[in-house]
Image (cartoon, rainbow, N blue to C red):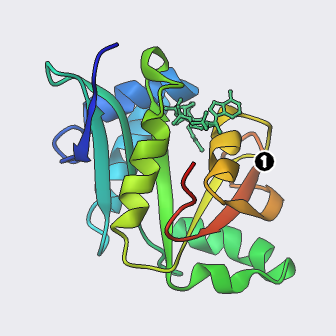
Amino acid sequence: MEELAVGPLDLAARVDDALAVQAVAFGLTDEEVAVRRHIVLRHLTSPGARALGATTADGRLAGFVYGMPNDRTQWWSTVVEPYLRAAGEEHWLDDSFVVTELHVHPAYQNRGIGRRLITGLTDGAGLPRSILSAIDAETPARGLYRALGYRDLARRVLFPSAPSPYAVMGAPLPLRRR
Ligand SMILES: CC(C)(COP(=O)(O)OP(=O)(O)OC[C@H]1O[C@@H](n2cnc3c(N)ncnc32)[C@H](O)[C@@H]1OP(=O)(O)O)[C@@H](O)C(=O)NCCC(=O)NCCS
C-alpha cells in the first residue's frame, strides 16, 4: 500500500487542494468551498494556528487537519459557549486547542491517517485539552474521536446556517494511543 507522509502543511498555499479533499470527504458544494476558503485563510491568521497534511510520494494531498488555541471571541466559540455553560462544561473553552477541520480523502480512509493527523496536531499544541465539533450522528469521525478520548460535552448544538445539529466533544491532551 502507498506510504503517506504526515507533516507540517502550508495550508494557506495549499488551501484549494485541502478544500478539494474536504469536498469529496465531507461533501461541499462549489459555493460552500468558496465560503470555506475565506474562513480557512482568516483562521490561519489566528495566533497559534497550525496545520498538518498527509501527502503522497508525488506530493498530492490525501488529508489534512488544522486548528488553533480557542479564542472566546471567535464565532465558533461564541456559538458553543451557551451550550457548554448549560451543561456545566464551560471551562473547556479555556486553555483548549480547537481542532477546526479534519478530512481524509475517501481513497485513503481507514488506514490510520486521520488518527496520525489529529494526534500529531494536538501533540504540538502545548495545551492540556482539546475541543471540537462534529455532526451529531454515529459517523466514522465520532468513532475516531471517542477512540482518542474525546467525550460529549454538549449535543444538539445548532450553528446558524448548518442544517444538522452538532456535538461538541472534549479530550485531555495528549490524546489516547491505541
Ligand atoms: C473522520 C476521518 C477523518 C477519519 O479518517 P481515517 O483516516 O479514515 O481514520 P483512521 O483510519 O485514522 O481511523 C482511526 C479510528 O477511527 C475510528 N473509525 C474509523 N472509521 C470508523 C467507522 N466507520 N466507524 C467507527 N469508527 C471508525 C476507529 O476507532 C479507528 O480506530 P482504529 O485505528 O483503532 O481502527 C474520515 O473518515 C473522513 O475524512 N470523514 C469524512 C469527513 C469528516 O467527517 N470529517 C470530520 C468532520 S468533524
Residue at 70 percent across and 44 percent down: it is 142
Residue at 35 percent across and 60 percent down: it is 43
Q: Picture coordinates of residue 124 (x, y %)?
A: 33, 67
In the rendered image, is residue 28 in sight? no
33 sits to left or right of 141 = left
Q: Picture coordinates of residue 29 (x, y %)?
A: 51, 24
40 sits to left or right of 127 = left
In the rendered image, is residue 9 in sight? yes
Q: Picture coordinates of residue 121 (x, y %)?
A: 37, 57
**Residue 96 vertical placement versus 98 (above, below):** below
| Residue at the far front in the pictured view | 178
Secondary structure at numbered mark 1: loop
Determine the image quadrant of residue 80: bottom right
Q: Looking at the picture, tell me which residue is in the foreground, 14 or 78.
A: 14
Quarter occupied by the N terminus: top left
Q: Picture coordinates of residue 177 (x, y %)?
A: 54, 54
**Residue 28 vertical placement versus 106 (above, below):** below
**Residue 116 vertical placement versus 32 (above, below):** below
* Mark 1 burial class by Cα count in 10 Å: few <14, some 14-19, many 20+: some
Tell which quarter ligand 1 is in.
top right
Residue position marked by numbered label 1 in the rendering: 165
Amino acid, disc 1 = Pro
Determine the image quadrant of residue 85: bottom right
The answer as to whether callout 1 falls within 8 Å of ligand 1 is no
Q: Looking at the picture, tell me which residue is in the foreground, 162 or 66.
A: 66
Determine the image quadrant of residue 33: top left
State how many labels appear: 1
28 sits to left or right of 155 = left
Residue at 66 percent across and 68 percent down: it is 79
